[in-house]
Image (cartoon, grey):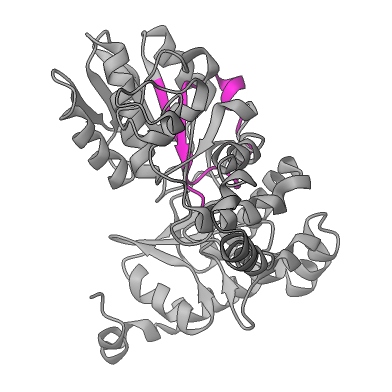
């Protein structure tokens, strides 16, 4: 695609107006929204209103003017992006904490089955949290196998199949419907990590027969660094599972101040501590951008941006490790190169912000709401120039940009 062809594609893009909803610094092509989404232009005002008017003027009265309902209200806005009912999603804590809660709850429910089955090379936190969860439930264990061994490893001991929908490194995507069905046929539950999926590709949890899911708010949802996370539990399981973190906000009557714990009905039982309202306000501002977005248009544009950068990468001699079939990937593209870290630093020096994943992966987020074809073509030109020049191999350059 030539620069003029890219500009023509951008002019005809049905999503082009959403670019103005984000603050993108001049001179920067941002290809790392799959790690941290950019600042929505409405977020500073939303935070100022919460700090100055709500917290500042209304003080504690704001708990009765929208704060106490925020985890459910914001969860309902995420629900429409992941194919869930509004009363199946709640916003709380971090992805790691939510993962722990659901893993322990699922293991306790599935007893005497006690195996969490997952994939080696999964995002490390997921496996680390699973290791901690099995330590809390006697007789349970984590069994991580290569992707091509998952199907044969599902057995009568499997309590839970824990998978990341889109792989953080390669962008490979699991067929959620097929794997949820495989788990169900073997009597196991499913728990999906949607952190690299939500806001990037269409998701239909209920249509796929998923049981549980978690996801973060700071990547494609643009909720800001450390944004609150979310969790999903299918209605058919909500009264069967109980959170192991029995905090007061998850109590059936939190302001009754009883000593004994009684879990709230529905998704409220997954709350623990007081909602972080500043983070919640920023996340809600990011989610409001999605109110009228057609996710199918997002998917179509994501696929086209991928094909554009994949072709440029091939011309530069890079090895693309992401699937060519858009139905089998997320919305980022990864290339393998022995000097991936140095190339990534050279790109950043030129205003193209992507990221590096150990040991040899260059990763670029293709976020259709604010990225255009002209951005991707220009980033590709710079990438080709850097690879062709070999300047990143200079010892002085590498010393200046050494990994610390």
Query: Does the segment drawn in magenta span residue 200?
Result: yes
What is the magenta range?
Answer: 190-217
Query: Does the segment drawn in magenta span residue 278?
Result: no
In the image: residue 220, left or right of residue 299: left
User: Could you tell me if residue 220 is visible in this image?
Assistant: yes
Give the x, y percent position of residue 29.
Answer: 59, 74
In the image: residue 283, left or right of residue 272: right
With respect to residue 135, does 229 lie above or below? below
User: Could you tell me if residue 233 is visible in this image?
Assistant: no
With respect to residue 342, does 40 lie above or below? above
Instruction: Please tell me which residue is depicted at 23% across the width and 75% down the height of the picture.
Output: 404
In the image: residue 353, left or right of residue 85: left
Q: Residue lying farthest bottom?
A: 396
Give the x, y percent position of residue 107.
Answer: 28, 19
With respect to residue 234, does 246 lie above or below? below
Give the x, y percent position of residue 372.
Answer: 71, 65
Give the x, y percent position of residue 113.
Answer: 24, 11
Q: Which image quarter holds the N terminus?
A: bottom right
Instruction: Please tell me which residue is depicted at 23% across the width and 42% down the height of the picture.
Output: 128
Instruction: Please tell me which residue is depicted at 28% across the width and 92% down the height of the picture.
Output: 396
């Amino acid at each position: 695609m030539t620069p003029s062809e890219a500009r023509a594609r951008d002019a005809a893009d049905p999503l082009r107006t959403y670019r103005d909803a984000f603050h993108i610094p001049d001179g920067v092509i941002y290809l790392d929204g799959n790690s941290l989404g950019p600042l929505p232009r409405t977020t500073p005002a939303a935070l100022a209103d919460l700090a100055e008017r709500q917290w500042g003027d209304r003080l504690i009265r704001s708990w009765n003017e929208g704060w106490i309902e925020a985890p459910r209200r914001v969860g309902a806005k995420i629900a429409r992006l992941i194919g869930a009912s509004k009363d199946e999603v709640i916003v709380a804590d971090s992805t790691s904490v939510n993962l722990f809660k659901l893993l322990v709850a699922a293991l306790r429910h599935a007893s005497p089955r006690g195996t969490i089955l997952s994939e080696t090379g999964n995002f490390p936190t997921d496996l680390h949290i699973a290791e901690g969860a099995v330590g809390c439930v006697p007789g349970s264990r984590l069994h991580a196998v290569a992707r091509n061994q998952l199907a044969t490893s599902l057995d009568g001991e499997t309590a839970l199949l824990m998978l990341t929908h889109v792989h953080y490194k390669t962008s490979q995507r699991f067929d959620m419907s097929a794997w949820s069905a495989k788990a169900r046929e073997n009597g196991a539950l499913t728990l999906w990590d949607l952190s690299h999926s939500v806001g990037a590709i269409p998701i239909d949890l209920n249509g796929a027969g998923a049981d549980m899911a978690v996801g973060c708010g700071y990547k494609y949802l643009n909720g800001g660094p450390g944004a609150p996370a979310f969790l999903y539990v299918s209605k058919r399981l909500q009264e069967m599972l109980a959170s192991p973190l029995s905090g007061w906000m998850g109590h059936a009557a939190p302001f009754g101040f009883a000593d004994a714990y009684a879990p709230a009905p529905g998704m409220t039982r997954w709350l623990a501590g007081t909602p972080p309202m500043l983070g919640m306000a920023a996340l809600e501002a990011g989610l409001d951008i999605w109110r009228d977005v057609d996710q199918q248009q997002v998917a179509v544009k994501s696929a086209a941006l991928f094909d554009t950068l994949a072709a440029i990468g091939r011309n530069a001699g890079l090895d693309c490790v992401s699937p060519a079939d858009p139905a089998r990937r997320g919305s980022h593209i990864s290339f393998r190169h022995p000097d991936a870290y140095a190339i990534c630093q050279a790109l950043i020096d030129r205003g193209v912000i992507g990221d590096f994943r150990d040991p040899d992966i260059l990763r670029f987020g293709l976020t259709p709401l604010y990225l255009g074809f002209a951005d991707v073509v220009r980033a590709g030109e710079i990438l080709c120039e850097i690879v062709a020049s070999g300047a990143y191999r200079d010892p002085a350059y590498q010393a200046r940009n050494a990994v610390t």
